[in-house]
């Protein structure tokens, strides 16, 4: 499984911890930045990573900023991408199982490294279940198609 990871300056330290953790799990990880705590605009990182996921370069992506919210909003602007902010075990599991989110976002100012690692595990182990959720995800895709300029 190929995993893309990225952060802004607020999420840099947590991103580095998660990246090292993923490598201990034997995961292939590509870092989309940043490389320091120098200030950057999170949409630049979110879009670059989300485009790579949408193109199939990676199976999943992880984005980290202060709250995780801005990264999710920016990543969700890329057609075909579903990003969900994950700060607890239940919503993290449901992001995959019910919503088929390929990108998880987290807030370094909201959760600590041990919880982040636990959530990454839950998210990696969860798969989209389809079933009753499939028609809802299909409706989301149709909304996206309606508003995507061609």
Image: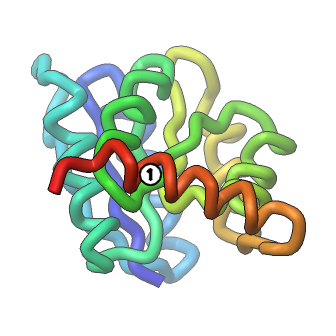
Which residue, given by chain and number where applicable, does mark 1 sit on? 62
Residue 99 image-quadrant placement: bottom right
- Residue at image coords 40%, 42%: 76
Count of numbered marks: 1
Residue 51 image-quadrant placement: bottom left
Residue 131, position in %: x, y? 87, 73
Residue in the foreground of this view, choosing between 20 and 75:
75
- Residue at image coords 62%, 55%: 139
Few, some or many C-alpha atoms within 10 Å of disc 1 (few <14, some 14-19, many ≥20)? many
The answer to whether one can see residue 1 in this image is yes
Residue in the foreground of this view, choosing between 18 and 96:
96
- Residue at image coords 19%, 48%: 149
- Colour logic: rainbow
Compared with 101, 9 (above or below) is: above
Q: Quadrant of the C terminus?
A: bottom left
Residue 119, position in %: x, y? 70, 48
Residue 20, position in %: x, y? 43, 59
| Residue 55 horizontal side relative to residue 111, left or right | left
| Residue 67 horizontal side relative to residue 2, left or right | right
Compared with 127, 19 (above or below) is: above
| Residue 112 horizontal side relative to residue 94, left or right | left
Residue 10, position in %: x, y? 33, 20
The answer to whether one can see residue 19 in this image is no
Residue in the foreground of this view, choosing between 79 and 72:
79
- Residue at image coords 57%, 75%: 25
């Amino acid at each position: 499984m190929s995993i893309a990871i990225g952060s802004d300056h607020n999420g840099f330290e947590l991103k580095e911890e998660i990246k090292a953790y993923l490598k201990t799990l034997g995961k292939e990880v590509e870092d989309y930045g940043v490389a320091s705590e120098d200030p950057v605009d999170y949409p630049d990182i979110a879009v670059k990573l989300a485009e790579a996921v949408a193109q199939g370069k990676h199976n999943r992506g992880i984005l980290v900023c202060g709250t995780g919210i801005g990264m999710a909003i920016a990543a969700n602007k890329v057609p075909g991408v579903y990003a969900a902010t994950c700060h607890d075990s239940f919503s993290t599991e449901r992001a995959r199982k019910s919503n088929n989110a390929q990108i998880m976002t987290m807030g370094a100012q909201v959760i600590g490294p041990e919880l982040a690692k636990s959530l990454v595990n839950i998210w990696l182990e969860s798969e989209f279940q389809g079933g009753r959720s499939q028609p809802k995800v299909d409706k989301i895709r149709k909304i996206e198609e309606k508003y995507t300029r061609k």
